[in-house]
Amino acid sequence: MHVRIREVQTLSDDWYLLRKTTFDYLRRDGSWQTMSRETYDRGHGAVILLYNLERRSVILVRQFRFPAYGHGEGHDGFLIEAPAGLLDQASPEARIKAEVEEETGYRVAEVRKVFEAFMSPGSVTERLYFFVAEYDPASRAGAGGGVHAEGEDIEVLELPLERAVEMMASGEIEDGKTIMLLQYAQLHLFR
C-alpha cells in the first residue's frame, strides 16, 4: 500500500460530503510524506449526448448553475450542457435513461457507454460515465424541463452539430463534460 490514512475529518455534510484527510504517502524514492487533502464527495454521475445522424443534430440543455454564477466573474450562471445526473444508487445505464427523459423529455431504449472519467480528481471524488444515444422526434415522450422539486428549470435545445461546435469555440458552451461528448461526436459519430 502506498497510502496510510492518519485522520479523516468531516468538514461539511450538508449538500454533499466534504472531508479533510491527513495521510502518509509512499513516494517513489521510498520515503513517506505526510499530506492533507480536502475531498468533495457527491457520488458518481452519468452524462449523455443525444444525436440524430440524419438531421446532423444534438440535444443539449440550458440550466442555471449557481457555482458558475456565484464565482464573481460576471457569468450569468446559465450553462449549455449535455443532460447529466448523479447515479443515486442506480446503475449508470438505468440512471442516465431516467435522467435524459426528466431533463429533455426524450425516451431512449438503447444507450452506449463510450468512456468514464474523473472530471476534477484533485478535489472531487466523482467518476462520470459518458453515454451516447440516437434520438428521433418521435421518441419525445414529454416536455422535459427537469424535476421542479429539485429546483430544476431546464430549457431543451436541439442544435445542428456544426452550431454546437461553433458554440464551443466561441465560449457559449463551457461545460467540460459537454465539450468532451461533442468532440467524441465529431470524431466518431458524424464523420
Image (cartoon, rainbow, N blue to C red):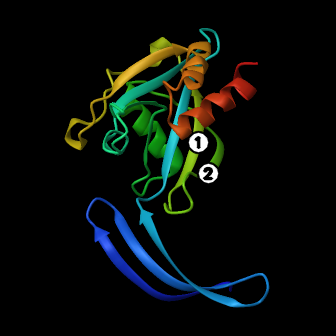
Counting from the top left corner in percent of width and height, residue 92 is at 52, 49
Which of these two is toward me, 113 or 166?
166
- State the mark number for residue 111: none
Counting from the top left corner in percent of width and height, residue 180 is at 62, 36
Name the residue rendered at 47%, 25% in the picture.
Answer: 60
Q: Quadrant of residue 156?
A: top left
Counting from the top left corner in percent of width and height, residue 57 is at 57, 15
In this view, 68 is above or below 91: above
Q: Examine the rendering and report whether any part of residue 134 can be seen.
A: no
In this view, 86 is above or below 47: below
Q: Residue furthest right?
A: 29
Q: Look at the numbered discs 2 and 1 and tell me whether their residues touch, using CB distance below 8 Å.
A: yes
- The residue tagged 2 is 117
Type of the residue with mark 1? Phe
Q: Residue furthest left?
A: 149
Name the residue rendered at 76%, 18% in the picture.
Answer: 191
- State the mark number for residue 130: 1
